Image (spheres, rainbow, N blue to C red):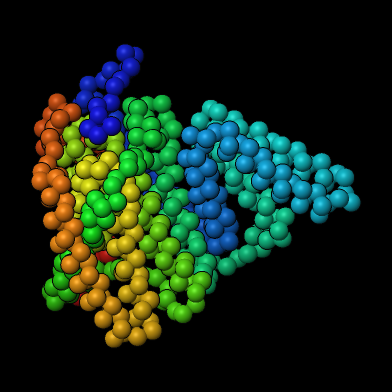
Amino acid sequence: MRNEQIRYTPEYVPTQKTELRRISSKIAKAFFLYLILIIFLDALSEFNVVFSIILAGSMVFSGLFWLISQKYPKICVYSFVVLSSVFCSFAILHKISDTFAVIPSILVHICLIFLVYMSIKFKKPLLLMVCFLEFSIISCEIVGLNYEKSTKGIANADAISFYTLHNLAEIAASVLPFLFILSKKDALLKLDISRVLCFEKVKRKKLFSLVMVGLFICFFANQVSNVLLQNLSLLGITCKLPNLPEVNKDPVRIVLYLIMISVSPALVEEFVFRGVILGSLRKFGNFFAIISSSILFGVVHSNAVQIPFAFVVGLILGMILVETNSMLPGILIHFLNNLFSCLDSIISEYNEEISQEFMTFRWMTVLILSIFAFRYILSIRPTLFEFDRNSHALFSTKKSMKIFFLSKGMIVVLLIFFLFTLSTVSLA
């Protein structure tokens, strides 16, 4: 499957230039939808944080349900039937004395089951999301959660609500637009989900070695970003970082904080950038796919300090994916890198001195392990990360990047993220 060129049907044989422009347009539209969802959920949370959580949660679960249904459609339909039947039973028990209220409840759940079946059969993810939203609203009414009376906005919400909404909104806004792309019968969809979510088996020793080397590069790039931030502050330039509620000793807060910073980005960002974007561009050359996905990975962070760090991390994660044809090493590196940053913040809440000692210990440990890991990788593969840059492309990497990044949609997307980046920079 590695370096495999996509075969087209006789009915659809576009030129590579046209195909690359179409993919660029599709990815740009996905980023537009991402921005719209983020802005919409953010605006909605200012008025009703409870309904925002319900809506974002419905989007997330419908997206996961859609992913699973692509491989196991019958299991998904049956599981929704069981879930809907359970909640329908609760509704009937609450309204057992009112026959006129019981019948509509049964009919609503039957309609939902039918619509879920139709959305899976005819590949309509938007319809599936609407079904899950309606199901979530009905479920809230059954358990007695009246979101309509909630007037609390995100500004007055507690930390748990903030972390919950942030997790669900980021997952929903990032995953759903690219799932929507994968559901369309178009050029990009010649890469089905099994191709995008590649998890070829990697030997444990090689997996551990790649993770250690990748983790060390992430640590090093992070230190360079910190030095850059300090130098910019000396020049009177400050870069705003995202404001998060303080992490205290509350276990629930800590768990949600770890999910928001460590788990969600590792899964979501790897799916989007190393999965959909890099996976769809590999047929135009591995080197081009790695560079392009890394540029987008950096730009989307929309922060002057994080952009170079994210670009370097994107490069190493992309090279590892091409080398192993598996997303697992990248997910582990991404997760561990963010996890250590979270642990630094959490430990510093207890004791600043211990936090510094922990940071030194993890640095030395990863450094030593990465040296042995790098030697092992070179011993089994001396030509590590050496691959044919344009094995599948008619154009050079430079020309492919020009075609990809100079499409109208992509230019607008890059301009929007550039403006977001400028908004985080201020002069003293």
Query: Where on the picture, by quarter, is residue 275?
Result: top left
Q: Position of residue 146 (x, y in %)?
A: 68, 60
Camera-side residue: 179 or 255?
255
Q: Is residue 233 left or right of residue 136?
A: left
Camera-side residue: 202 or 179?
202
The residue at the point 43 percent across, 62 percent down is 259
Q: Position of residue 226 (x, y in %)?
A: 19, 70
The residue at the point 46 percent across, 50 percent down is 172
The answer to whether any part of residue 415 appears in the image is no
Q: Is residue 300 left or right of residue 346?
A: left
Query: Where on the picture, by quarter, is residue 23?
Result: top left
The residue at the point 36 percent across, 40 percent down is 197
Quarter holding the N terminus is top left
Q: Is residue 320 left or right of residue 346?
A: left
Give above or below for 405 relative to 420.
Answer: above
The answer to whether any part of residue 80 appears in the image is yes
The residue at the point 54 percent across, 57 percent down is 52
Q: Position of residue 308 (x, y in %)?
A: 19, 58
The outermost residue toward the top is 10
Number of marks present in the image shown: 0
Quarter holding the C terminus is bottom left
Give above or below for 297 relative to 125.
Answer: below
Q: Position of residue 192 (x, y in %)?
A: 38, 32
Q: Is residue 389 left or right of residue 310?
A: left
Give above or below for 238 relative to 194.
Answer: below
